[in-house]
Amino acid sequence: MRTGWRRFVTWLPALIVLPGLVAVVLHYSSLEKFAQLARNAQPEWLLPALGAQVGTYVFAALSWRQVLHRAGERRPFRTLFRLSVAKLYTDQAIPTGGVSGSILVMKALNRRGLSNGVGMAALLVSMVAHYAADVVAALGALSLLWLHHDADVVALALVSVFVVVEVAIPVAVLWGRSRVSNGGLPAWIDRLPLTRDVIAAVAEAPDDLLRDPRLIVETFGCQLAIILLDSLTLWLVCRAIGTPTDFWIAFCGYTIGDVVAMVAPSPLGLGTFEAGTTGTLALLGLPVEAALSATILLRGLTFWLPMLPGLWIARHEVSRL
């Protein structure tokens, strides 16, 4: 293992655990509010919301499995499902645009006998599809807001910055990959921690997998399904608290919240996502208290409930690297 990887893995357990502890301490009142809302919510709507969240992990695992199957590498679906839970938590605990969770999953797949190239291809294809789905969702939400005369300069600016960031990350990774293949990286990249190791691993990904249109479409469909399931979860929790709304409003609320969390990152995304989602729901007609309650309940289902299993799986995987 290279020095960069060794140093990263040494610090990874602390990087995974500490944000979770900080979140619990600083947002204990939010956690209490989530528990109270969950107790009072209508179970006929809350249980399907839980099912929708399980579906997000299923589709995340499916996006990796598509690549592995295309490469002739088959791994148990339960393993990929477990890693999808760990990746979600790690990505939120260490906000690096999905890189931290991707590193964890890649090393976990390596330990299970998968080559660096195929493992990185699975993550790279999923990453590109994920960012593409995010961009499509953001532009779709902005279009819906514009059609209903609720788009303003702030929404346009947020989505524009979001699109630039979402496009820049995969483009930078693919650019680095091409530079490694064509004669090396600029000297300044060598001074960035882990960057050379990550790009070198990306360079090992087989070209035929990265350029397979059918594979890219399939993984894009999986990533878009995750966004729609998260939006469905918000739609269901609105009904669970007795404030039904249209699905397009829930979709805009979730998507704009995600945009705000990316443009103005905070530890674990706490605070910025809630502000973006609550503000959008209120703008689109929900009472502010109901919008905040629905957002807290959504955040509980998407973050607080998966925190313990995600933390446990991540720590377990790191301890065996």
Image: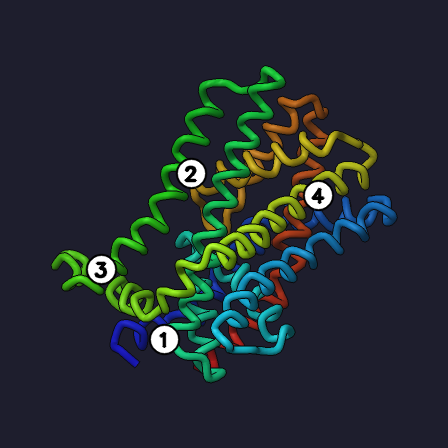
Instruction: Give the spatial CA distance, label 1 vs label 4.
Output: 39 Å
In the image, what residue occupies the spot 72% across and 52% down? 52
Judge from the rendering whether residue 113 lies leftward or rightward of residue 59; answer left or right: left
**Tag 1, which secondary structure?**
helix
Q: Is residue 249 visible?
A: yes
Residue marked by disc 1: 10
Q: Nearer the viewer, mark 1 or mark 3?
A: 3
Pick the residue in front: 303 or 170.
170
Label 3's element?
Answer: loop
Res 4 → quadrant: bottom left
Q: Earlier in the sequence, mark 1 or mark 3?
A: 1
> The residue under label 3 is which amino acid type?
Leu
| Vertical side of 122 occupied by 154: above or below | above
Query: Splitting the image into 4 quarters, where does residue 65 fall?
Result: bottom right
Distance from label 3 to label 4 (Cα)? 40 Å
Label 3 neighbour load within 10 Å: few <14, some 14-19, many 20+: few
* Gap in angstroms between the C-alphas marked 2 and 4: 23 Å
Q: Read off the residue under disc 2.
A: 263
Q: Which residue is mark 4?
A: 232
Q: CA distance from mark 3 to mark 2?
A: 22 Å
- Sequence-wise, the earlier of marks 3 and 2 is 3
| Mark 3–mark 4 CB contact (< 8 Å) | no
Which kind of residue does numbered mark 4 sit on? Leu
Q: Position of residue 80 (x, y in %)?
A: 58, 71
Which residue lies at the image location 56% right of the left edge and 78% below the top edge?
74
Residue beneath label 3, please? Answer: 192
Sequence order check: which comes first, mark 2 or mark 1? 1
Amino acid type of the residue tagged 1 in the rendering: Thr
